[in-house]
Image: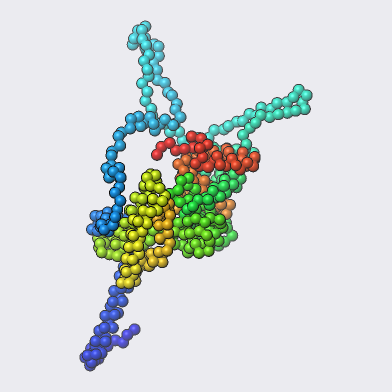
Amino acid sequence: MGKKYTKQELNSCSKEVLITLLLSMQDQVDRLNTNMEKLIEQINIANQNKFGRKTEKVDILDGQMHLFNEAEKILETLYVPEPPIEDVVKVKPKKTKGKREADLSGLPTKVVNHELSNDELQSIFGAKWKRLPDEVYKRLNYVPATVEVIEHHIAVYAGLDNQTMVKADRPLDLFSNSIATPSLVAGILNGKYVNALPFNRMEQEFKRNEINLTRQLMASWTIHSYERYFSFFYDFLHERLLSYPILQADETPVTVVKDNRPAGSKSYFWIYRTGEKLANPIILYDYQKTRKADHPRSFLSGFDGYLVTDAYSVYQQLDREEDLTVAACWSHARRRYAEVVKSLGKNAPSDAIAVQALLLIGAIYKQDQRLSKNRSNDDLSYEEILSRRQLIVKPLVDAYFTWVAKQLQTTGKGKTKDALQYSVNQEKYLRVFLSHADLSLDNNASERSIRSVAIGRNNWVTIDTIDGAKASAGIYSIVETAKANKLKPYDYLKLLLEELPKINKSGDKSQLEKLLPWSESLPDECHQTMK
């Protein structure tokens, strides 16, 4: 603490001493104001994270303009290619006739006839009448989940000499002497991994329908179906995943109760998926106890393409030590500025550094998304996209990093400076997307893929055993890959549980190719028919 002067002591001080004291006080006030601003900013961000909307969309400039609308002001001096007329003039689609018929065409139909008796007809028409074409209307009926017993009768034949006996062929059992069928197990897996229903809720629902299936039995079927059948199909997908030129990765925590560690220890589902812009997507989860670099190093062994990730140091360690190339996520860079802007409220000043940063990043996104749209519509080739990224997007990226370096020279402590510094630290990785036409600007696709696990985790909270965690990771992989390829998860799971036991018995792994989610051999019922 500094010395406290009395009024008498101050009166006796020389002019030079008073000036020194005043300057010292000004320095202390400046530091106090800076710390206060930083504290207020931290409180606002904490309140926003706790009570605010969980979105990166930000209304700025008097609360009237979205950050991307204002981005045009930054682009006035840059060359921007003319968009096709279809992007300029939005034509209202014509109303489709027979839409209800199309929506209901793929559903099973039960015909209910409504007729008049002969006595009623004779009382109206007498002896002469004829029947015209029926008036037909359709209504959609709902039948709650039901279970039926399938009783198999296997014909047995014996020769007259009683020396030879033959049985007719019968379907393979999923498990020895088990009542489980592909349709039943697929329904249970669909409930847990698609609809996020814990086994105890399914057990209660079964009981309400007078069916006694315990949660322990359902858990057993889940683990055994993965270990016996889905695991080698998972390995097949894993091998195929590593052949893609671009992958994306992320991880999310889960709690496993019985893993020989203290209660509350975190485990992780690592997610690896093919690049968002690539055809035939594959999404795989890998259960591990930790977030160490050994896990992605092992999982990605042999992969030498691009890996889109967040800034977690483990991935950048792989970039330095392995043959793969890491590309950083622009969404993470943008998110830090968005937190600051949201903490400032709707009246955030347009000249605030965080607001300007969002505008600059928004301009990069807008131009790159326009190129990506042309790429997905086959309007531009890979080479044309790459060339235009260098011509149009790269100058925006260069301008952003030049601006960031300049702002860092004058910005004090706080979240804004942290956001600027983050971009500087990640610049090498944030620029990588410019080197490949199919690289995404961000890792949002991986975060979306994690959402199903996050929703399920809110319901089932913990996983009981390591075997259960491995099974869950594997089955989530099958389900999310099916959804990404526009398949109906239940029908696809049912198909796999019908076909994988045959492949397992024959040992002919070449048949797995026909079961890939994009295979033309898949039956029609596996495909979604409605957009």
101 relative position to 30: left or right: right
Q: Taking 399 as reference, is 512 above or below it?
A: above
The residue drawn where x is 29% and y is 53% is 80
Can the viewer see residue 529 in this picture?
yes
Q: Quadrant of residue 60?
A: bottom left
Return the x and y of residue 474 as percentages of the image width and height: 54, 49
**Quarter the N terminus occupies:** bottom left
The residue drawn where x is 28% and y is 83% is 24
Return the x and y of residue 31 as percentages of the image width and height: 31, 76
The residue drawn where x is 56% and y is 44% is 218
Return the x and y of residue 501 as percentages of the image width and height: 61, 40
Q: Taking 26 as reference, is 283 above or below it?
A: above
Return the x and y of residue 391 as percentages of the image width and height: 35, 56
Query: 472 or 522: which is nearer to us?
Result: 522
Q: Taking 256 as reference, is 111 above or below it?
A: above
Can the viewer see residue 200 in this picture?
no
467 relative position to 405: left or right: right
Q: Quadrant of residue 171?
A: top right
